[in-house]
Amino acid sequence: MSPHEIPFIRALVPFLTGIALGSTIEVPIPGLWIGLLVGGIGLVRLALLKQSFRYRWVYGLVLAAWLLAAGYWHSVAYDERNLPAHFTKVCPDAVVFIGIVNDAPDRGNKVKVPLRIEAAAMRPGEWRTCEGHLMLFFDPMHKAEALRYGDRIWVAAQAKLVGPPRNPHAFNYQRYLHYHNLHYQAFVRDSAAFGLIDRGHGNWMRRTAYAWREQLLLVLREYFPSQDEYAVASALLLGYKEDLTEELRNIYVQTGSMHALAVSGTHVGLIYAALYFLVRRIPWRGALKRWGETALLLAGIWMFALITGASPSVMRASVMFTLFLVGRALYRHASAWNVLGAAAFILLLINPYTLFDLGFQLSFAAVAGIVGILPVLQRYSPQLPSWLRPLWDILLVGIAAQLGTLPLSLYYFHQFPVYFWLAGWVVVLGGALYMWGAIVLLIFHGLLPSVAEALGVGLYSWLRGMNDLLRFIQHLPGSMVQGIWISGLSVICLYGCIAYGTAGIFYKRLRWLIVSLACLLVVFGEQLVRQVKQLQQGEVVFYATGRNFLVDFFDGTSLSTWSDSISQRRERSVAATHRLALGFLEPSERISPSFLVPFRAPNLLVQPPFIQFFDKTIAVVEHARQLGNSDAIPIPVEALVLRKNVHVTLAECLKHFSPKVVVVDASNSLRRAQQWATEGESLGLAVYDIRRQGAWMLCTR
């Protein structure tokens, strides 16, 4: 394949590099847009002039630099915080907002509602026109759950900047919201603090699509009475995953089948196949036939994309099908790589932050895997009977897609489903039959209710059997390899290994295979260095866990954990990722929650109120009586940890301990923590508030 056949891929690389730089640096460059405008005009004029073939690389280099600068500008300019009319600039002290619900509310423990702000005020009646977005969190209440996309509401709330993660290696919710152009949040706990003004705003197509989805969900609820089957039915057909239980999510994640519940190219392809089957039977001729079929197919595909929420994965597939269908109608045939690059380019032009969406990355990686790896697998696959060929092709497509997403999956999820190929047969075949059957079910629901009821019983049993089969696969021996931790460098090297290895096998180039092996050796080398560092690690972490107490002691290949009554789910959400980064799935030992029972390990002694870890001493005080004799010489400690609103002053503590820092954990009230912070400032003593500043860490080596 010649580079000249894939111009969009060549243009995409510098463009997305610029987007990545802009999103990292986040500093506007004055006058950059003027330079881009002048440079763009110059590039067009140069392209129209007759150029020497010998110096064509100069034009390519200048164009790449222009695209990189354009990506940088596009990324920075897209950040709403740079808008002159942003609500933080127009009315920075606003406590009342008017805005439009900008997406379908997410209903869970909290009702999450993204609000597109139209006006703000310090008090009602003093409105100032402004713009920007605000993520609202409502306590579960009927009034909040009744909100819909396009509703104009008023809300009295204090907008606060979304903070960074409070624990090491924790999910960066601040960054996640940033890539959705959301930087401020507000919590609404009283139904009197907000109200509906009117309805029917926003994009009419999205509003109509969401209304249709609500109606379709009600129809599915009639035919799938049990929770698990209804959740899978609505996720497979409509991409609606809010009703999935944690157990059901784990089943699909641990079998490598979660992609089936996230509407993607497979679903769009199935919709296309069903629509194509129908439109081919319309008796029209000539150009009317060609363009009529194209228009109907595109209308169906894009309506499906809107109903399912227009996620990046389904948008990628919809754009690709659009390019393919329009090209076919124009009698144009393009490289699959070029179509893939064009689709990515279009989506990034619309929203540069799409680059950082996990669904976008996995979707494009899967398609790239199919386009690049599938031909190699097909070339070297055995000859099989014709009746086995479709099943074998499904297996090969699944393997190619899995290899395409493997580095990203290991980086984000730290695990690998061994039987993904087996589960792939279940979800691809089962999902396809369900989707086609569900479309027929929805058609017959209003026309022939008796037929729809019989079909609904069959589809219900089908999904139940599919879920049971996935549960069986989940519990097969060695079904999941967990505890995998790789860096960004390893992701790049793994993709280099896959790309050069695949190309080397396909084109029989030894040097490419050598490059592939070198990339793999870099990954192995980095893992070896990481394991050597783990042998020498020594670290104490007091996690930010709300009102609970959780401390990890990392000593080489041993992990001791000290906690109170924290739930397992909460402990995993707080500490699991950091433990994994340091080489642990579970603690080696658990220290008794009782504060009175000593614990001994090779380099650790917990004997309240003291913790001795290597050569570091920490005092943990939660009762005033633990201060001991006031006549004693103050004991030097690395840190003094105060818990449970212990009734002591820092001045009293300094009579017994001589700490380098005072750590106030989250079991203390805000008022008490503030008192200690004020006192510490007057005494010249550093006070670290875990509730406000996040986890406190101490390295001992």
Image (cartoon, rainbow, N blue to C red):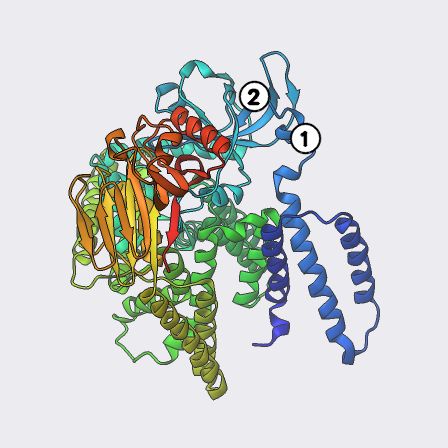
Q: Nearer the viewer, residue 695 or 105?
A: 695
Reply above or below: 318 against 187: below
Upstream in sequence: badge 2 or badge 1:
1
| Identity of the residue drawn at 72% across and 69% down | 61
Reply above or below: 339 against 77: below
| Identity of the residue drawn at 29% across and 80% down | 383
Residue 582 sits in quarter: bottom left
x and y percentages locating residue 277 in the rendered image: 40, 53
Q: Are marks 2 and 1 in contact (CB under 8 Å)?
A: no
Identify the residue under disc 2.
98
x and y percentages locating residue 681 in the rendered image: 50, 33
Q: Nearer the viewer, residue 167 or 67?
A: 167
Q: Amino acid at mark 2?
A: Ile
Residue 56 sits in quarter: bottom right
> In the picture, which quadrant includes the N terminus?
bottom right
Q: Amino acid at mark 1?
A: Ala
Cα separation between marks 2 and 1 = 15 Å
